[in-house]
Image (cartoon, rainbow, N blue to C red):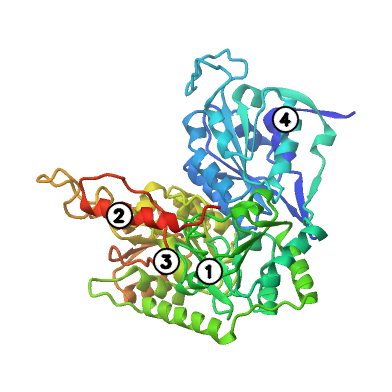
């Protein structure tokens, strides 16, 4: 057996450089490169390997460990999980900074490989700088924190362990059902330790991702649910995109006259103006989608994980005899809501189900005019909100209308948290696939700018826009600098509404007078944050980091700034001043947020009674 002597870090990079995936006969290099921030836990291990022997792997210097993992996650998401970046950090705080982003990737079922540095395996320099000392168990280190947020976790305590761990990592990263964050904790001494690795370990590997077929028995169970279904609805989740099932979903809906409702991850599966596309469903859903969902006797979830936003905290589907059919490659998701599971690749399942229902002569019971009326009424509502001229200033919905009408149809928008995702889910009108990129599984504040950079890496020929509130921007904007460094232009649309207004609204809806959520000066009289708004100049801040910047306080100024931004070749920020509280809400939906059972406030007591009554109406799957 021929061997080659390499350090563990060198061997890891050589291995990653030769990993490929094949889907439907199309072969793709799986690992594009490594994003990293160096410290004493990785600079002389992986750092040396990236400097001297990176192969074809691209190295990108992150500015914040969480931010760079968000960028890697967005890159993989925009590539429909078919290419990834690995991320490396030092030990201690550098590693722990990646934990929230690891959770974001795992919750959203997006593959990302994390390579945090770790303590010395020999334990001789003890305790090393930044070491977490857990006196009850000295095998525990900071990297153990990745266990609950990783789909696979391993610590490489000896260089030869890499061979087993790397193959297991690839197994999970390339598994459509089980993918998410994979963590390989790398003790800093082991990274630099040499071993005689078999040459075969570094041979090109092609991981074939077979589409999981439908079993005949499962197909029969699924088709039988349609026998009495007069008012079915299709719920399109992210799995529709990852399976390339957009066209077959449209064919299925058209064949049987079934309306399509979209989750955040599934939005864009059908063009917004498709006659059967009723838009977002649930807490942030449209009136058309929510009314159809309430009366549905069969809900068909395709590639969705069913968050409480999708089901309006299980209060949305009110038909007394409603059945649930879950089409999902992940068995855990397919079993949710006590539904009938059709555990298979989304595209294969929808094709097979359409063929079976055609044989059985199925047709939904909707009147064509009924669905047309629902859609027309909602389109008129969006038109109204897009043209909303608030006397107090530029409303958030008006700003979104201007943006939607001005940017190119093939442009990508990226969002994650605050009130913007709700408005985007309801109001945004995507005409093409892969243009609506929302991280709403974890709704991680700070994803937006980093995610836009990752999407721009994946889509160099498209304009990419980060849709971000001032609160999220202040939490994390570090990869703005990286986008300039890598010459990957993004346009940051910063909605300045003076604070965490989404949560401020949520507070007041549940009995609060508003507390601690707006960016105000502390008032000497009250001792609270009730003074004037903080005068933050976000455009000036962006310029100080090397970006171009504009400000907009009216629809006309915003349209002009968007046109100017299109001409820029450098990352650009547009600071958009919007009136607080001018986002959308309601549309016959409900989100369960429990409030105190007892309070000195009458408003809180009233809110408690309302939540209790609504909770009793929700289903208990």
Of 548 and 435, nearer the camera is 435
Q: Which of marks 1 and 3 is nearer the N terminus?
A: 1
Residue shown at the point (28%, 66%) measured from the top left: 579
Residue shown at the point (52%, 15%) measured from the top left: 136
Q: What element carries label 1?
A: helix
In space, the residues marked 4 and 1 are separated at their CA atoms by 49 Å
| Residue wearing tag 1 | 293
Q: Is residue 540 visible?
A: no
Q: Nearer the viewer, mark 3 or mark 4?
A: 3
Residue 310 is situated, as x and y percent measured from the top left of the image, at 51, 60
Residue 421 is situated, as x and y percent measured from the top left of the image, at 44, 61
Does residue 258 appear to the left or right of 554 in the view shown?
Answer: right
Q: In the current view of this chain or complex, which residue is farthest to the front?
A: 320
Of 97 and 46, nearer the camera is 97
Picture quadrant where residue 195 is located: top right
Residue 14 is situated, as x and y percent measured from the top left of the image, at 73, 38
Give above or below for 403 relative to 283: below
Residue shown at the point (49%, 75%) measured from the top left: 288
Would you call the spot at circle 3 few (<14 residues within 10 Å), some (14-19), or many (20 or more)? many
In space, the residues marked 1 and 3 are separated at their CA atoms by 19 Å
Q: Is mark 3 on a helix, strand or loop?
A: helix
| Residue wearing tag 3 | 423
Would you call the spot at circle 1 few (<14 residues within 10 Å), some (14-19), or many (20 or more)? many
Disc assigned to residue 162: 4
Q: Which of marks 3 and 2 is nearer the N terminus?
A: 3
| Residue wearing tag 2 | 607
Tag 4–tag 1 contact (CB < 8 Å): no
């Amino acid at each position: 057996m021929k061997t080659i002597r390499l350090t563990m870090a060198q061997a890891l990079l050589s291995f990653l450089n030769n990993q490929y995936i094949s889907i439907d006969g199309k072969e793709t290099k799986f690992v594009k490169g490594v994003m990293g921030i160096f410290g004493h836990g990785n600079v002389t291990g992986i750092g040396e390997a990236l400097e001297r022997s990176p192969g074809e792997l691209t190295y990108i210097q992150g500015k914040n460990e969480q931010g760079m993992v968000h960028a890697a996650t967005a890159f993989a998401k925009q590539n429909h999980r078919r290419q990834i970046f690995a991320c490396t950090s030092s030990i201690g705080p550098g590693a722990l900074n990646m934990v929230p982003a690891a959770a974001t990737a795992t919750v959203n079922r997006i593959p990302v490989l994390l390579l945090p540095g770790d303590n010395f395996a020999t334990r001789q320099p003890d305790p090393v700088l930044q070491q977490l000392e857990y006196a009850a168990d000295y095998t525990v280190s900071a990297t153990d924190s990745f266990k609950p947020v990783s789909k696979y976790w391993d610590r490489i305590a000896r260089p030869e362990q890499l061979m087993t761990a790397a193959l297991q990592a690839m197994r999970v990263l390339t598994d459509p059902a089980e993918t998410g964050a994979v963590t390989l904790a790398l003790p800093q001494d082991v990274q630099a330790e040499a071993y005689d690795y078999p040459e075969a370990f570094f041979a090109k590997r092609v991981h074939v991702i077979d589409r999981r077929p439908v079993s005949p028995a499962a197909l029969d169970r699924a088709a039988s649910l349609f026998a009495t279904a007069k008012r079915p609805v299709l719920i399109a989740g992210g799995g529709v995109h990852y399976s390339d099932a957009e066209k077959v979903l449209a064919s299925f809906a058209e064949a049987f006259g079934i309306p399509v409702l979209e989750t955040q991850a599934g939005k864009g599966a059908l063009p917004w103006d498709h006659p059967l596309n009723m838009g977002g469903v649930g807490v942030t859903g449209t009136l058309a989608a929510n009314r159809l969902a309430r009366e549905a006797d069969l809900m068909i979830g395709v590639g969705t994980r069913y968050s409480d936003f999708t089901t309006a905290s299980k209060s949305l589907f009110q038909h007394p005899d409603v059945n649930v059919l879950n089409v999902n490659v992940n068995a855990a998701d397919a079993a949710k809501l006590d539904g009938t599971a059709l555990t298979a690749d989304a595209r294969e399942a929808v094709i097979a189900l359409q063929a079976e229902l055609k044989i059985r002569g199925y047709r939904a019971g909707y009147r064509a005019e009924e669905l047309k009326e629902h859609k027309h009424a909602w389109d008129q509502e969006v038109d109204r909100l897009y043209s909303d001229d608030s006397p107090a200033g530029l409303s958030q919905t008006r700003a979104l209308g201007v943006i939607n009408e001005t940017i190119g149809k093939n442009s990508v928008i990226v969002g994650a948290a605050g009130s913007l995702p709700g408005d985007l889910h309801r109001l945004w009108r995507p005409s093409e696939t892969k243009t609506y990129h929302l991280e709403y599984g974890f709704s991680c504040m700070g994803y937006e700018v980093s995610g836009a950079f990752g999407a721009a890496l994946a889509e160099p020929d498209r304009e990419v826009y980060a849709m971000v509130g001032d609160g999220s921007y202040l939490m994390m904007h570090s990869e703005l600098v990286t986008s300039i460094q890598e010459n990957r232009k993004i346009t940051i649309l910063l909605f300045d509404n003076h604070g965490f207004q989404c949560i401020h609204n949520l507070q007041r809806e549940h009995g609060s007078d508003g507390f601690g959520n707006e960016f105000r000066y502390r008032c000497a009289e009250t001792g609270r944050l009730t003074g004037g708004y903080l005068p933050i100049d976000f455009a000036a801040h962006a310029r100080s980091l090397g970006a171009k910047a504009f400000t907009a306080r009216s629809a006309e100024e915003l349209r002009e700034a968007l046109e100017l931004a299109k001409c820029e070749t450098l990352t650009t920020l547009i600071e958009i001043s919007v009136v607080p509280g001018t986002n959308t809400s309601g549309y016959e939906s409900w989100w369960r947020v429990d409030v105190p059972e007892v309070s000195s406030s009458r408003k809180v007591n009233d809110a408690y009674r309302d939540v209790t009554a609504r909770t009793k109406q929700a289903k208990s799957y």
